[in-house]
Each structure stands twice: as C-alpha cells, then as structure tokens.
Amino acid sequence: MRKKYFGYVIVIAVVVLSVLCAGCSSKKEATNQEKQTVDLQALQEAMIKADTTLPEMKVAMSTDEEAEEEFSVFSDFSYDRVQSFFYAYAADGGCQEIAVVQLKEAGDAAALMNTFKEHLKERHDALAVYQPKQVPLVDHAVIKQKGSLVTMIISEKNGLIQKVFEEVMCEQ
C-alpha cells in the first residue's frame, strides 16, 4: 500500500514539476534586475510532498494576516526586505521545517542565510535538552539559494526536498 501511495505522490510531483519547469527552460532573464516570479503555494506543496516521512505540517505564508510575526519565528531578518515566504513546520512540535523566502533583492541572500544558521543553532541547543534524538536532523539541515530565493530544510529526506526546490527554480 505504501509503495502504491508513494508512486502516486511521485507521479503528482513529476507532473507539477513538469508544468512549472515548462516555462523555465525557454525563459532567459532579460536583465539581472528582472524579478523572479514563483508560485510559492505550488512550490510549498511540491516540497512537502517530496518527503513522505514528514509529519503533518502546518504552513504560514506571507499572505497570512500575521505574516511578519510568523516570519520572525524562524528568522530575525528585516521583514521589509522580504517579497514573500512560506514556512512549513511539524504540527506535532517535531523539528521538521521547510522555509522558502523570496527576497526583494538577491544581494540580501547571505544575510538571510546567516539568520537561518542562527535559527538552526538555536533549534540544535533546544532539542539537545528535550528531544536529543532529533538533533541530527537539525545538524544535517540544508540552506540553499537560487537567485532571490533562499530555502532552509530540516527533514529526514532533505535531499529530496532540495531537489524539488532546485528543479522548480531551474533557470530562475
């Protein structure tokens, strides 16, 4: 049953990625100033579906009423420099998290990535006290940048989630 379910998830992910990347392969940036346009809702769904080991995930998005407060949960980066974001986290209080932030300026990526590193250090220290078995997940977290987008992934299968991020972002 799990193999059948996993097969359906893979097929759905491939279809979503094919549709999203169809426009990517032929698009070229007109200038370095051209803004990336990303459907964060579709990206969020594809990234979560990529790892079937994830627990139920709650999602906060930049379209939420309290977006700035939700953003501050995982980053102390200046919110006025953020174009949009999503943040998925384990509903059961586990350490699994996926965040994607689209910046107004790609040049701010290093500063945002530093706040992600600080968040991971804080998560490591807290988990070491009350859930030490989850510390390795945080220690092997992924932080990546593609243009004006930056992702942070804490998951058992973070490589699969990262691959979805990179495929969706193909040439952006």
Image (tube, rainbow, N blue to C red):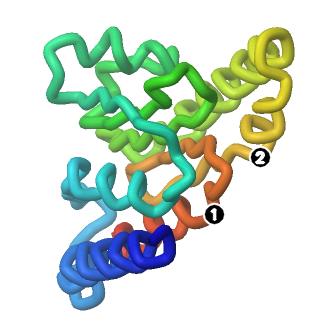
Please report the residue visible at 26 percent of the width from the left and 83 percent of the height from the top.
Answer: 18
In the image, 8: left or right of 163?
left
Compared with 73, 4 (above or below) is: below
Helix, strand or loop status at disc 2: loop
Task: Classify 10 Å Cα crowding around label 1: few (below 14), some (14-19), many (20 and above).
Answer: some
Residue 119 coordinates in the image, percent (x, y): 64, 22
In the image, 108: left or right of 79?
right
Compared with 81, 5 (above or below) is: below
Please report the residue visible at 17 percent of the width from the left and 22 percent of the height from the top.
Answer: 64
Instruction: Answer whether residue 27 is visible to the viewer in this image.
Output: no
In the image, 160: left or right of 137?
left
Type of amino acid under label 2: His
Q: Quadrant of the N terminus?
A: bottom left
Please report the residue visible at 41 percent of the width from the left and 52 percent of the height from the top.
Answer: 48
Residue 106 coordinates in the image, percent (x, y): 41, 47
Q: Quadrant of the C terminus?
A: bottom left
Q: Which residue position is annotated with label 1? A: 159
Q: How far apart, in angstroms, are the residues tagged by discs 1 and 2?
A: 10 Å
Q: Nearer the viewer, residue 111 or 14?
A: 14
Task: Classify 10 Å Cα crowding around label 2: few (below 14), some (14-19), many (20 and above).
Answer: some
Residue 170 falls in which quadrant of the image?
A: bottom left
Instruction: Answer whether residue 83 is visible to the viewer in this image.
Output: yes
In the image, 145: left or right of 22?
right
Please report the residue visible at 72 percent of the width from the left and 16 percent of the height from the top.
Answer: 122
Compared with 159, 58 (above or below) is: above
Q: Nearer the viewer, residue 137 or 101?
A: 137
Residue 133 coordinates in the image, percent (x, y): 83, 30
Q: Which residue position is annotated with label 2? A: 140
Q: Farthest residue to the front: give it.
A: 1
Q: Earlier in the sequence, mark 1 or mark 2?
A: 2
Type of amino acid under label 1: Gly
Helix, strand or loop status at disc 1: helix
